[in-house]
């Protein structure tokens, strides 16, 4: 116990300032001001891997490390789409995942936002051209913000999420 | 020793050192398998090329004492009927044969004919009957940030009587996609078979390709590839150690290890321009050279990260709650691990002392004495201990590699190999041995490419390790295996 406390003190505060939203990532119209007010600044995210190589997942996980201070941005990852405001979808959509993805989208209460992640999620990328994949996320459900990169860095992912919240 | 007669008949194969190939008939196919099993060898990979109408080939690769043995069974057109299944000798063969049927239409004699990659709903799970037994279905979309798959638990109260996984949700048709690519461009797709093993897969692909093109990479490229491979191992182990602490109720561990991992990723990006090294290993060498200044800076961060990991290890060891959750959970006895042919770090935590860096070493591992880190406990604690030890091993190897980077070029010119040339790449990734089998096609294209992740062997072992444990311990036990979905869904 003492050792852990000493470690916490020695490391100190390392979290960085969150990035500003980036309009260039937006693919669909901005959030209605009233909806944004309802959502406030507490955002619940449900991640869905629709066919990723798992590289994008590594960066979503990295987003949880102390440098990025997600809690400070009032962002939480939740266990069910029913509790989510935003779906963060990685990968091209594998055929076998099209239905689970549609179901997760349907289960997410309105107003909902979708952020497509990575070159695969945005355009299909390297994996989207495979014969049992359906290409980009937008081919299956509506997408509001698309964050390119293979994989996109945690800062870019956070920027994409914050862009989706802007009115 | 009967295995030796096969080994002596076999020819050396292009690519990974210490691998030979052998063409056999139907009876011999089974006899080789028996002889391998009798001498403690394991099935590393199995796949099928071709189709019933045009004729097909079944391939099995074994890891044996004398080396890697690739066995090929030709099935002529019209007679591509069931080939002898290997599931009785090597349980992991069953799903491989089912997946191979889904991809090629060529059937094995395995009585289990349920589709694996092709999803016909509903999947016929094996039912457990009995008083008070009920089923819990989880997935495909999971509660955490992980890949999709379905788990069906049969439980009494909280106790698990049976677990059956149903995977294939992220099947994208990678093998078919490889066949549409120029052979000199396939490494980018190989790196994305399982992103957490990007270096291992892209190196295995390039090793096969360079072997069948008859070219040798410059020494500097080999050293830099090993730097990348060890960085990938270190990063994944740090991530897992944090997540395992968290799953044992110790959030402090996650905060600390995820910080260390981030430090390492940033130092990696400073040296190589990428956090995850997806596109560093390229045919003929590496795409990025590292200056001596950035090599030194990287070595400093690695040294600091490993020192902190050692410090955190004592905190884990002394934390009673963590120790209690780790010890005895998800035990996979060495005997069962041997029977199931479990590979890589999960195997080493259950007494299976294989490590391709020692057993089938390529440059620079021929110059580095890698001793496999082996435990016999087989529980979560053993898999954690292997990771902690391998972190220190990575630290030592990286220090040595970075201090002694040979000078010179870091790529060599490479021409597309001749049509029909066949090679195998085999690299010990962080999870275990990763294999890529590659055959050149006409006009510089890929005739076939089969990437194989060790998760194929280890998923069935997870289903045994959970037996008798309680459902709430599944996340911890599952994390201690940390298997790939993408890598096996193909
Ligand atoms: S964008 Fe890159 S990292 Fe993300 S899923 Fe696709 S291949 Fe993997």
Image (spheres, rainbow, N blue to C red):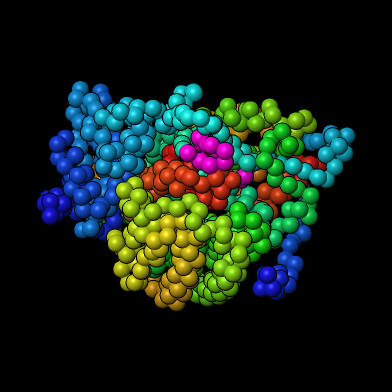
Residue B77 lies, in percent from the top left, at: 20, 25
Residue A120 lies, in percent from the top left, at: 56, 40
**Residue that appears at 34% across and 42% down:** B92
Q: Which residues are magenta?
A: B144-161
User: Can see residue A105?
Assistant: yes
Q: Answer above or below: position of B33 versus B115.
A: below
In what quadrant of the picture does the N terminus of chain B appear? bottom left
**Of all residues shown, which one is farthest toward the front?**
B131
Please state if B443 lies on the left or on the right of B185 as rendered.
left
Please state if B186 lies on the left or on the right of A30 as rendered.
left
- Please tell me how many numbered marks the rendered image carries: 0
Residue nearest the observer in this picture, A116 or B89: B89
In what quadrant of the picture does the C terminus of chain B appear? top left
**Residue that appears at 74% across and 42% down:** A44
Q: Residue B313 sits in which quadrant?
A: bottom right
Q: Answer above or below: position of A137 versus B52.
A: below
**Residue that appears at 56% across and 48% down:** B473
**Residue that appears at 53% across and 58% down:** B326
Q: Answer above or below: position of B162 versus B397.
A: above
Q: Residue B215 sits in which quadrant?
A: bottom left
Residue A152 lies, in percent from the top left, at: 61, 49
Q: Residue B181 sits in which quadrant?
A: top left
Residue nearest the observer in this picture, B287 or B86: B86
Q: Is residue B63 magenta?
A: no
Residue A1 lies, in percent from the top left, at: 68, 70
User: Can see residue A19?
Assistant: no
């Amino acid at each position: 116990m003492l050792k852990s406390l000493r470690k916490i003190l020695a490391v100190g505060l390392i979290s960085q300032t969150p990035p500003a939203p980036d309009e260039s990532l937006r693919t669909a119209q901005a959030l209605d001001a009233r909806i944004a007010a309802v959502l406030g600044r507490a955002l619940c995210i449900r991640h869905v891997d629709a066919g990723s190589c798992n590289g994008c997942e590594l960066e979503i996980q990295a987003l949880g490390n102390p440098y990025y201070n997600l809690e400070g941005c009032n962002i939480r990852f939740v266990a069910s789409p029913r509790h989510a405001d935003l779906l963060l979808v990685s990968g091209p959509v594998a055929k076998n995942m099209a239905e689970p993805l549609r179901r997760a989208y349907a289960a997410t209460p309105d107003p909902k936002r979708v952020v497509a992640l990575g070159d695969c999620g945005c355009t299909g990328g390297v994996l989207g051209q495979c014969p049992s994949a359906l290409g980009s996320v937008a081919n299956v459900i509506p997408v509001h913000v698309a964050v390119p990169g293979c994989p996109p860095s945690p800062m870019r992912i956070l920027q994409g999420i914050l862009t989706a919240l802007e009115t | 020793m009967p295995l030796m007669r096969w080994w002596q008949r076999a020819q050396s194969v292009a690519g990974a050192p210490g691998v030979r190939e052998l063409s056999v008939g139907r009876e011999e196919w089974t006899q080789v398998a028996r002889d391998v099993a009798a001498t403690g060898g394991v099935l590393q990979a199995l796949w099928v090329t071709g189709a019933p109408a045009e004729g097909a080939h079944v391939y099995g690769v074994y890891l044996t004492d004398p080396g890697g043995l690739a066995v090929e069974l030709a099935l002529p057109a019209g007679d591509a009927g069931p080939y002898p299944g290997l599931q009785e000798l090597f349980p992991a063969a069953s799903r491989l044969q089912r997946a191979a049927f889904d991809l090629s239409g060529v059937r094995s004699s395995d009585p289990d004919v349920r589709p694996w990659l092709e999803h016909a709903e509903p999947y016929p799970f094996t039912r457990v009957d009995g008083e008070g037994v009920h089923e819990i279905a989880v997935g495909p979309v999971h509660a955490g940030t992980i890949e999709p798959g379905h788990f069906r638990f049969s439980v009494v109260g909280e106790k698990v009587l049976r677990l059956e996984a149903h995977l294939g949700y992220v099947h994208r048709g990678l093998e078919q996609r490889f066949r549409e690519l120029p052979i000199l461009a396939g490494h980018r797709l190989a790196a994305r078979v399982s992103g957490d093993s990007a270096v291992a897969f892209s190196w295995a692909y390039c090793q096969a390709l360079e072997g069948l093109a008859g070219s040798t990479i410059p020494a500097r490229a080999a050293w830099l590839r090993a730097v990348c491979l060890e960085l990938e191992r270190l990063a994944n182990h740090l991530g897992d150690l944090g997540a395992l602490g968290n799953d044992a109720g110790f959030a402090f561990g996650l905060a600390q290890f995820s910080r260390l991992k981030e430090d390492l990723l940033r130092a990696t990006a400073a040296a190589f321009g990428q956090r995850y090294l997806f596109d560093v290993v390229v045919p003929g060498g590496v795409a990025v050279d590292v200056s001596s200044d950035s090599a030194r800076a990287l070595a400093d961060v690695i040294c600091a990260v490993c020192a902190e990991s050692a410090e955190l290890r004592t905190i884990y060891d002394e934390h009673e709650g963590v120790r209690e959750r780790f010890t005895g959970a998800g035990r996979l006895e060495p005997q069962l691990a041997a029977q199931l042919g479990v590979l890589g770090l999960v195997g080493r935590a259950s007494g299976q002392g294989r490590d391709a860096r020692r057993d089938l070493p390529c440059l620079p591992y021929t110059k580095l004495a890698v001793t496999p880190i082996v435990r016999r406990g087989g529980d979560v604690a053993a898999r954690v201990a292997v990771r902690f030890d391998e972190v220190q091993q990575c630290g030592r190897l990286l220090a040595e590699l970075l201090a002694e980077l040979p000078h010179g070029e870091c790529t060599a010119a490479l021409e597309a190999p001749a049509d029909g040339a066949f090679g195998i790449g085999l690299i010990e990734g962080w999870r275990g041995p990763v294999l890529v089998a590659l055959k050149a096609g006409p006009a510089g294209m890929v005739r076939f490419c089969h990437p194989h992740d060790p998760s194929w062997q280890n998923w069935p072992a997870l289903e045994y390790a959970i037996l008798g444990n309680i459902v709430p311990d599944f996340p911890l036990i599952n994390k201690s295996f940390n298997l790939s979905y993408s890598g096996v869904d193909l």
